[in-house]
């Protein structure tokens, strides 16, 4: 892995993602902008004061190279984005292009045992699921988690119900790990399922010990001859431990049958479902609140991290904001990497780790782009292969040139995180390479159109 634990990058996350080694991350959680058509800023005087971001999208905000890159290399992904444009407009198209190029990099950096959780709301959740199905594979979809995001009545009107939930799209790679999570038993559940109390007031249920069908072990126990699901030795051990209750089959019946005492306080709880209503949203008075707009509770991230990672695994949050993921990962003894375009994120992670975890120092702040550690041949060795793939055509002006007139170019400039991998290389004629310079492929195409070289 080419990035150290406890690193925060203050940078656009796309070039940073491009610089992280392939298949090196165990878990990604991202809480990106929601395309909510709003601008956000933390209140003055809060820990997060100075943090702000806009969540409105137009095509002028997007490097059009992403659009061309998706259309050329990921036609299914491009079609999903195009469908969203037809139904929702250019703002949604712009937003989804921004997300798509990042999701492609996130897939590349995830291990085969890795998982990704994308946090969104109903504004774009259905469109984002189309992207996720395309990038990560529809068969790798695990859950659409519903989280209770409301601290009160949200956007209530006379024409609809108030909005009170977010969506978390959970995908696992081909060999992804998962640890079952449990919710505390509610008082209602305890009353309906643990209907008895022992002499100490401990709640218990009386479980049937009969073996199903003709299976089990046949013997007489406490005057009852049956097929039991436990051995006779185990039955007498439980009896000596006080775990057997000799109970009537029906109220008032003289016929009694042994049953097993299962205590409520020994239960792990109920396996968590995909509606996480018991994890409440933060309010401004919560102890962990920093004032950061869209801050999520630590409990939410702890559930995700516990479910889909183990101790010392690497957790990545590419939109880390006020660093809740980093704090939760540190608490749970995971390694973590955060990326945020605002330099405020590094201040917040340091303050929060000190206040909430008791950890001082050790946070690495970087503003550069990491260099992938994979050993690659010199990129010039790909020239013959690229010439064959492009059939001798310049990838700019689309004119045919002899081999010796072609030059190798990085589609995504190295200054923006582009690598020497073959999929980031192309051949341009000398004139197009000079025109492109250190710019993007989209800028090259735009200039060629302005010059009348391309229609």
Image (cartoon, helix red, strand yellow):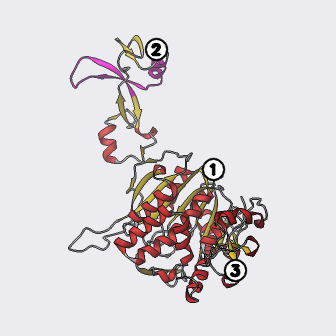
Q: Which residue is mark 3?
A: 433
Badge nearest the viewer, 2 or 1:
1
Judging by the rendered image, the residue that carries numbered circle 1 is: 311
Distance between mark 2 and mark 3 Cα atoms? 83 Å
Determine if the magenta segment contains residue 265: no
Q: Position of residue 273 (x, y in %)?
A: 40, 49
User: Could you give the CA–CA distance between mark 2 and mark 1, rounded to whole angstroms?
Assistant: 40 Å
Using the image, tell me which numbered label, if any, was put on residue 443: none
Vertical comparison of 248 with 324: above or below: above
* Magenta-highlighted residues: 234-260
User: Left of 411 or right of it: where is 44?
Assistant: left
**Earlier residue among tags 2 and 3:** 2
| C-alpha span from label 1 to label 3 | 48 Å
Q: Is residue 253 magenta?
A: yes
Residue shown at the point (51%, 81%) measured from the top left: 61
* Quarter of the figure with residue 360: bottom right
Q: How many marks?
A: 3
From the image, tell me which residue sits under label 2.
232
């Amino acid at each position: 892995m080419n990035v150290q634990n406890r690193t925060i990058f203050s940078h656009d996350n796309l070039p940073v993602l491009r610089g992280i080694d392939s298949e090196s991350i165990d878990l990604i959680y991202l809480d990106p902008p929601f395309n909510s058509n709003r601008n956000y800023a933390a209140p003055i005087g809060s820990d997060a004061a100075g943090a702000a971001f806009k969540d409105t999208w137009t095509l002028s905000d997007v490097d059009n190279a992403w659009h061309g890159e998706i259309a050329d290399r990921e036609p299914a992904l491009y079609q999903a984005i195009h469908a969203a444009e037809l139904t929702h407009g250019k703002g949604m198209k712009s937003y989804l292009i921004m997300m798509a190029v990042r999701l492609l990099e996130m897939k590349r950096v995830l291990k085969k045992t890795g998982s990704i959780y994308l946090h969104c709301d109903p504004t774009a959740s259905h469109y984002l699921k189309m992207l996720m199905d395309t990038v990560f594979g529809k068969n790798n979809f695990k859950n659409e988690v519903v989280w209770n995001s409301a601290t009160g009545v949200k956007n209530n009107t006379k024409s609809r119900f108030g909005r009170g939930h977010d969506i978390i799209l959970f995908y696992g790679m081909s060999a992804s790990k998962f640890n079952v999570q449990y919710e505390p038993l509610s008082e209602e559940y305890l009353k309906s399922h643990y209907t008895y109390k022992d002499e100490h007031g401990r709640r218990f249920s009386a479980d049937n010990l009969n073996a199903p069908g003709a299976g089990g072990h046949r013997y007489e126990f406490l005057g009852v001859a049956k097929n039991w699901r436990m051995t006779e030795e185990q039955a007498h051990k439980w009896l000596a431990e006080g775990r057997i209750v000799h109970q009537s089959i029906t109220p008032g019946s003289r016929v009694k049958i042994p049953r097993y005492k299962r205590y409520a306080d020994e239960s792990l709880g109920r396996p968590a479902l995909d509606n996480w209503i018991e994890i409440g949203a933060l309010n401004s008075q919560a102890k962990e609140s920093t004032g950061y707009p869209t801050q999520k509770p630590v409990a939410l991230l702890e559930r995700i991290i516990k479910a889909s990672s183990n101790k010392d695994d690497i957790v990545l949050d590419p939109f880390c904001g006020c660093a809740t993921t980093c704090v939760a990962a540190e608490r749970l003894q995971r390694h973590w990497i955060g990326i945020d375009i605002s330099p405020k994120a590094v201040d917040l992670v340091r303050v929060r780790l000190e206040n909430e975890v008791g950890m001082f120092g050790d946070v690495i702040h970087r503003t550069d782009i990491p260099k992938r550690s994979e050993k690659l041949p010199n990129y010039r060795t790909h020239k013959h292969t690229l010439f064959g793939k492009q059939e001798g055509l310049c990838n700019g002006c689309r004119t045919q040139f002899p081999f010796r007139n072609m030059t190798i170019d990085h589609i995504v400039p190295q200054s923006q995180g582009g690598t020497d991998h073959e999929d980031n290389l192309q051949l341009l004629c000398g004139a197009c390479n000079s025109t492109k310079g250190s710019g993007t492929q989209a800028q090259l195409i735009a200039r060629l159109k302005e010059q009348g070289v391309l229609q």
